[in-house]
Image (spheres, grey):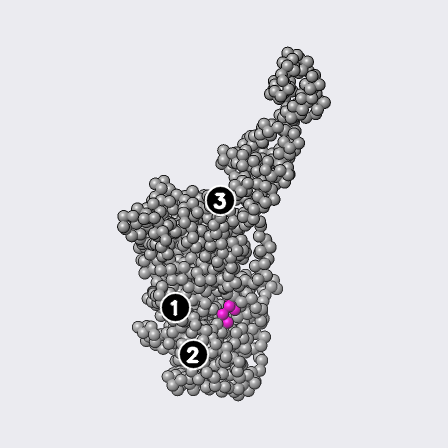
Amino acid sequence: MHNKTIAQISRDLAAGEYSSVEITQHLLDRIAQQDSTYNAFITVTAEQALAQAKAADENRAAGNASVWTGVPMAHKDVFCTNGVLTTCGSKMLSNFVAPYDATVVSNFNNAGAVSLGKLNMDEFAMGSSNENSFFGPVKNPWNHDCVPGGSSGGSAAAVAARLVPGATATDTGGSIRQPASFCGVTGIKPTYGRVSRWGMIAYASSLDQGGAIARSSEDAAMMLNVMASFDPKDSTCVDQAVPDYTANLNDSVEGLTIGLPKEYFRDDLSAEMQQQIRDAVAEYEKMGAKVKEISLPNTHLAIPSYYVIAPAECSANLSRMDGVRFGHRCEDPKDINDLYKRSRGEGFGEEVKRRIMVGAYTLSAGFYDAYYKQAQQVRRLVKNDFVAAFKDVDVIMGPTAPSPAFKAGEKTSDPVAMYLEDIFTIALNLAGLPGMSIPCGQINGLPVGLQLIGNYFNESRLLNLGHQFQQATDWHLKTPAGLV
Amino acid sequence: MEWEVVIGLEIHAQLATKSKIFSGASTQYGADANTQACAVDLGLPGVLPVFNEEALRMAVKFGLAIDAEIGKKSVFDRKNYFYPDLPKGYQTTQLHHPIVGIGHIDIELDNGETKRINVTRAHLEEDAGKSVHEGFEGMSGIDLNRAGTPLIEIVSEPEMRSAKEAAAYFRKMHSIVTYLGICDGDLSQGSMRCDCNVSLRPKGQQEFGTRTEIKNVNSFRNVERAIEAEIARQMDILEDGGRILQETRLYDADKNETRGMRSKEVANDYRYFPCPDLLPILIEDNYIEAVRETLPELPDAKRHRFVKDHGLSATDAAVLAADRELAHYFETAAKLVNDYKLAANWVQGDVSATLNRLEISIGQLPVSAEQLGRILLLIKDSTLNNGGAKEVFNALVALGEAGKADSSVEKVDALVDSMGLKQVSDTGAIEAIVAEVLANNPKLVEGYLATPVEKRGKAMGPFIGLTRKAAAGVNPQVVMEVLKQKLEELG
């Protein structure tokens, strides 16, 4: 039952093959038995899940069912859930219970979905390996010595390990696509402004975007149908009609032009990786798509620009975590400054502190122009590269990450090596473009992800391309060795 | 040495929106602590600001009222600093692209001249909460009801040259924002607060001296006194050859002195940057024009009109136009009686005296403008004499004080009747009374007739007194006329 996709579960529930309570109980049991291995969940909400499942079954019996009624899923612990712990992977929020649901959470609740719990992540979504969580690292189901990627490592691992058929996630610099790539699952980061950020704890507000991780493009489309909405509570949310993302999954890709940026296939990308990606692109050529080499000349500026802008925004976004109104507070503070220093010193992990420090530095008087302002100008250059490219091509493809999943501990002492993990993903966040990662091959038994980059609000096209690939290949159906 | 004083003011005015600048919580003053602070005001994780467009409309209205440039694109920035009553750890404000650009207002000087003071800018921002230091045994309480209340910060050019000018500027700004209805102007509740930048320089020197900033002064009187005190302090230091330290100071009204705040409280690098949660505000010309349509007549225009169209003195006009409610009261009454001078005298006389005595605002006066208009009309048509009019006015005030206020015009007439204040102006009736008085006082009549004609005016006095004694409320003017006529008939 746990191998079923969202689409299958939806159909099975409609056909009465099993009830929502049954599949929910089955997955809860599986989580209880297996998650001690993966550590994908921070909080399992068994009781609420069964109550939601029961209500879903009753609704279905009463004839009030939609495609999501009774379908189980789970949320990255960055999304606030009314009455349920929301930690953001941090000691700072290890006691935080929000009095409201994120819009994404209420969208799923309203659709009738069943939430099984809250998924592990790098602290405040800062990291590429899920080793920065206060609640411990997450294991990659394909190889327990490897990281699942980050920051949505819990979401990707839970989906890959068949603990949930789909999970919400967020992506600030690659946090959906890179773990999807590492865990052999499908992940989509929509256009900035497509999914509401209300109730999604901010890391870098101008880059953060909610999205989905699932086992197929079809499932990702079903999730996006629920997640995407215009939300007046988020001023950066775009008021544009939400299409049915499943409607165009079967469109032909014949005649489409795929752009391959030469900057994504440089010599420092291993020959094996290059081959995997080119093989995947060849599948599309078989379907009648054309391939064109393009250039995104400012690609090398994306990481430096990102690591000025994101820390600057996070330095302000995380100021509210001060131990005054909620979250971790130090014991017996002497005065307000002591309270601030110790609460924050104790509550934040190393990577979070590093980014806050970098951000505070780049915004300080005398440095602003050289760093923050400059980075914003570079950001525009990066965006312009894409705008120009999309005049000639329909979609851009390349690797999601420079390599398959790496070993835990391998990069923890070298932040820059860790930051380079996001070299192919970060530019999209700077530009606000939608991107997707689908499994397209394997190296040494570890999945490789193909990244698809679309023009603004062209999620349907990405999902269509993903679905067509998954109709022609079976990489997305592969299961981690030893998975029970 | 002769010193020149240089003063610039930064005025924070709370905008009178119903809800906060970035949340739906109420801005009502005086509620129980933290009952008007929602998740956004508390700065909980995951919440986002949504800009209240009413605050924009009010800020634009202000900009138009001071003839300022309106920022077609204004941008919210985050001003970062840690303070317990600042929930997000940053204040959302506008640094480089304020909603209101360069403008100006005119203030009236003691010598009757007006002086133009330029306004550098005015920007939108959110207010912080309040720290409460009493009653928490070594801890501090935080009340976030005020957090997120919309403010405009109005920054003047350093163009004021005395504490009096500064106070006049503050008063004029108060007058403008209350006229516009964008701020309730209640200084005691902190609806308007003022930071005063003060420096001295040798007369004739171009370069500014080192300035100090007196924070959060909250009354007209204290602005003047605080600046006076700071000028005196700086002058003492400079005269002794000392140097002024650039710092933030607080004014202690009880001791009438300013004192420096600890440098720890002020040494901040605010690390401003554009707020990524809010889009830039883009304004089009037709929006600005639509707001312009809603501008009321402003104090200066009203003042000029009172002088030009209604013949009031410049002083009377200035006093009556300064406060929108008072001006409205005055105009309503004046229009009813169609005598602006009479109304002006009453409003500045009995009305103002009553307001001062009861310590109330014009809106709370138990005598409505319509009632005053009616009273004045009754004076004009001789139904009431001045004394009677005051009695009616005071009776209405007394009713109000007793909690039985009645603001109807009919009440005025009812009181005139019940208090027997109606003057007898009917010539026939007065003729009869006068005839009786003359008949009963033959000796007085004899004496009068014996008086030379040129002195008879004075000699009429006793008859007037007797007539009025015989019938209270007779119109003295009619009595005079009838007496004159009757006595002349006698010889």
Q: Which residues are magenta?
A: A190-195
Foreground: B265 or B354? B354
Instruction: Look at discs 3 and 2 and give the one toward the viewer.
Output: 3
In the image, residue B488 lies in the stretch drawn in magenta: no
Distance of label 1 from label 3 (alpha carbons) = 49 Å
Secondary structure mostly seen in the magenta stretch: loop
Residue that mark 2 sits on: A298
Instruction: Look at discs 2 and 1 and give the one toward the viewer.
Output: 1
Dividing the picture into quadrants, the one containing residue A367 is bottom left
Are discs 1 and 3 both within one chain?
A: no
For disc 2, the chain is: A
Distance of label 2 from label 1 (alpha carbons) = 20 Å
Determine the residue located farthest toward the left in the rendered image: B241
Instruction: Give the image location of residue B233, x and y in percent.
Output: 32, 46
Distance of label 3 from label 2 (alpha carbons) = 66 Å
Q: Residues within 10 Å of mark 2 (few under 14, many from 20)?
A: some
Left or right of B221 on screen, residue B16: right
Instruction: Give the image location of residue A30, x and y in percent.
Output: 44, 69
| Residue A369, disc | 1
For label 3, the SS is loop
Residue B15 versus residue B336 in the image, above or below: below
- Point 56% across, 63% down: residue: B284
Residue that mark 3 sits on: B112
Residue A280 versus residue A35 in the image, above or below: below
Q: Residues within 10 Å of mark 1 (few under 14, many from 20)?
A: some
In the image, residue A194 lies in the stretch drawn in magenta: yes
For label 1, the SS is helix
Residue A396 versus residue B299 in the image, above or below: below
Foreground: A261 or B409? B409
Instruction: Give the image location of residue A23, x and y in percent.
Output: 50, 68
